[in-house]
């Protein structure tokens, strides 16, 4: 659809036509595969190799990206991504010299940039340098690594923990190494990409079940358990796109009855749930040993970068000596380990940070629902979506709010289904009640447009 063909149309009709064109092009792009008979021709040397097999600009994924970018350009929407922040991004941030209310940061507890955490990182640089320069098995430990891992295990009531340099890689290497072709992994249908990549690496059979539906999981295990050796169930503490959480005791009962392992991804729940912010375990009053594999990230509530696994000693020793993503990867940088250790100590010393975060989330959810915003199944703890129905509308809404001093990112296809495109609001304990009221009021105003 050309710009010229849109001249003279009302903005509403123009947007509808562009959206329809976008959806049609996305469908066509996803179906643009080489027919099977073409492979036979290629193998026989009777057909040219298609361009998408040797040109990056013809790659199907890049083509979809260009379709979305072209649609945004026709509507006059600038890219909402990769905005350069002028300083620390917490409840507020500065972009291009202007201050914004910020809802696009995982800095839930306001600890990234906290003077005490920054001082710990600076001290670690002075003592240990900026890198350990090799894997920990080769280059040796730094006391900070073990101090951090011991503190994580203590927070969970588990025997030991191991820290990885990447949260995404933590799931990939843990699942990819521990499970194999004779095993089964069952996961919530909304599980994070890192889990899916880990399952693919493992070669295990993969079966999703309906979101948070423990009964569906139970039924699947009743049918499938005895066909496999090891079985892993993977769910999240708080789901990052929807902001809801599972009824964890039900899943623990199921994993015990079916002799399966249970893994919880606490990327968004540790530091958020529970009276002291110790996560979904504390929220439900559970013991650390009730779950086989606890996973979390250091980049959100803990103000660093990387991930961790905590559980029984046998699990942790196994991963430290044999998991490729730990054994063959450089050890965590000392200032990062020091920052996350200091953040964990601050979380435990100041539980009111997590309490304030939950209060702000509850207020946002209440006000948003009262004004008719579709917040889906969010529990109002740290992540609250505003579901608007299509990628272009989400992008326009994000741009409109940015003009009004609110930084919130759109989540577009293919990260979510096209009809469930949304803005995703991340709460922070640094947001005031006035900040929350202002943000929801402006959101409601722009949605009404």
Image (cartoon, rainbow, N blue to C red):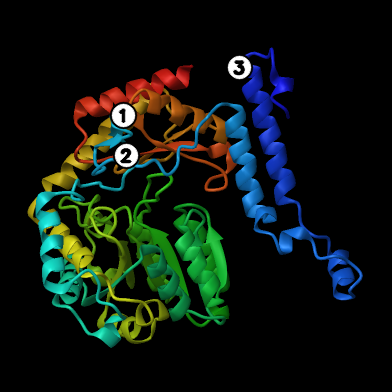
Residue occupied by mark 1: 366
Numbered mark located on residue 380 in the image: 2
Say which of marks 1 and 3 sits in front.
Answer: 3
Tell me which corner region of the image, top left, top right, bottom left or bottom right, holds residue 287.
Answer: bottom left
Q: Which mark is residue 183?
A: none
Is residue 146 positioned above or below 400 on the image? below
Mark 2 Cα shell of 10 Å, populated few (<14), some (14-19), many (≥20): many
Judge left or right: residue 383 versus residue 185.
Answer: left
- Whole-percent x, y for residue 223 in the image: 57, 70
Instruction: Find out whether the residues at labels 1 and 3 contact each other: C-beta distance under 8 Å.
Output: no
Percent across and percent down for residue 60 are 67, 54
Q: Is residue 393 above or below residue 301?
A: above
Report if the CB atoms under discs 1 and 2 are less than 8 Å apart.
yes
Query: Sequence-wise, which precedes: disc 1 or disc 3?
Result: 3
Q: Where does the N terminus fall, quadrant-wise?
A: top right
- Cα separation, mark 1 vs mark 2, equals 8 Å
Residue 295 sits in quarter:
bottom left
In this view of the protein, which residue sits in the foreground, 57 or 314? 57
- Judging from the image, what secondary structure is the residue with disc 3 in? helix
Determine whether the residue tagged by mark 1 lies in a helix, strand or loop.
Answer: helix
Q: Which element carries disc 2, helix, strand or loop?
A: loop
Q: Which residue is mark 3?
A: 11
- The answer to whether residue 97 shows anywhere in this view is yes
Residue 326 lies, in percent from the top left, at 35, 78
Callout 1 crowding tier (Cα within 10 Å): few <14, some 14–19, many ≥20? some
Left or right: 201 in relation to 233: right
Image point 18% across, 47% down: which residue? 354
Disc 2/disc 3 C-alpha distance (Å): 34 Å
> Percent x, y for residue 357?
21, 41
Residue beneath the point at 34% across and 58% down: 248
């Amino acid at each position: 659809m050309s710009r010229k063909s849109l001249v003279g149309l009302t903005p509403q009709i123009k947007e509808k036509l562009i959206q329809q064109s976008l959806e049609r092009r996305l469908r066509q792009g996803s179906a643009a595969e080489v027919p099977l008979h073409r492979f036979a021709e290629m193998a026989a040397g009777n057909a040219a190799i298609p361009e998408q097999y040797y040109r990056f600009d013809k790659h199907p994924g890049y083509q979809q990206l260009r379709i979305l970018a072209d649609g945004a350009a026709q509507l006059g929407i600038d890219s909402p991504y990769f905005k350069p922040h002028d300083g620390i991004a917490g409840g507020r941030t500065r972009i291009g010299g202007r201050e914004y209310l910020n809802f696009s940061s995982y800095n839930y507890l306001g600890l990234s940039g906290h003077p005490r955490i920054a001082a710990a990182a600076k001290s670690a640089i002075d003592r240990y340098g900026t890198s350990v320069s090799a894997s920990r098995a080769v280059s040796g430990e730094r006391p900070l690594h073990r101090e951090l891992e011991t503190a994580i295990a203590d927070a969970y009531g588990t025997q030991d923990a191991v820290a990885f340099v990447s949260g995404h890689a933590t799931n990939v290497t843990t699942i990819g190494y521990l499970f194999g072709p004779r095993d089964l992994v069952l996961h919530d249908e909304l599980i994070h990409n890192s889990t899916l990549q880990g399952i693919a690496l493992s070669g295990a059979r993969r079966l999703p079940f309906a979101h948070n539906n423990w009964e569906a999981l139970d039924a699947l295990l009743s049918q499938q358990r005895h066909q496999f050796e090891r079985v892993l169930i993977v769910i999240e503490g708080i789901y990052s796109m929807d902001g809801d959480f599972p009824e964890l005791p039900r899943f623990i009962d199921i994993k015990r009855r079916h002799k399966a392992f249970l893994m919880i991804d606490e990327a968004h729940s540790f530091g958020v749930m529970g009276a002291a912010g110790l996560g979904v375990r504390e929220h439900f009053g559970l013991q650390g040993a009730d779950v086989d594999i606890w996973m979390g990230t250091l980049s959100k509530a803990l103000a660093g970068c990387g991930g961790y696994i905590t559980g029984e000693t046998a699990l942790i020793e196994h991963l430290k000596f044999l998991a490729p993503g730990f054994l063959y990867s450089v050890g965590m940088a000392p200032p990062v380990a020091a920052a996350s250790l200091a953040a964990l100590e601050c979380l435990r010393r100041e539980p009111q940070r997590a309490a304030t975060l939950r209060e702000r989330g509850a207020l946002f959810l209440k006000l948003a629902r009262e004004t008719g915003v579709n917040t889906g199944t969010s529990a109002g703890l740290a992540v609250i979506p505003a579901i608007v129905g299509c990628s272009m509308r989400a992008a326009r809404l994000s741009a409109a709010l940015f003009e009004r001093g609110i930084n919130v990112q759109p989540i577009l296809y293919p990260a979510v289904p096209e009809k469930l495109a949304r803005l995703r609001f991340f709460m922070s304990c640094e947001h005031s009640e006035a900040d929350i009221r202002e943000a929801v009021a402006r959101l409601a105003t722009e949605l009404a447009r």
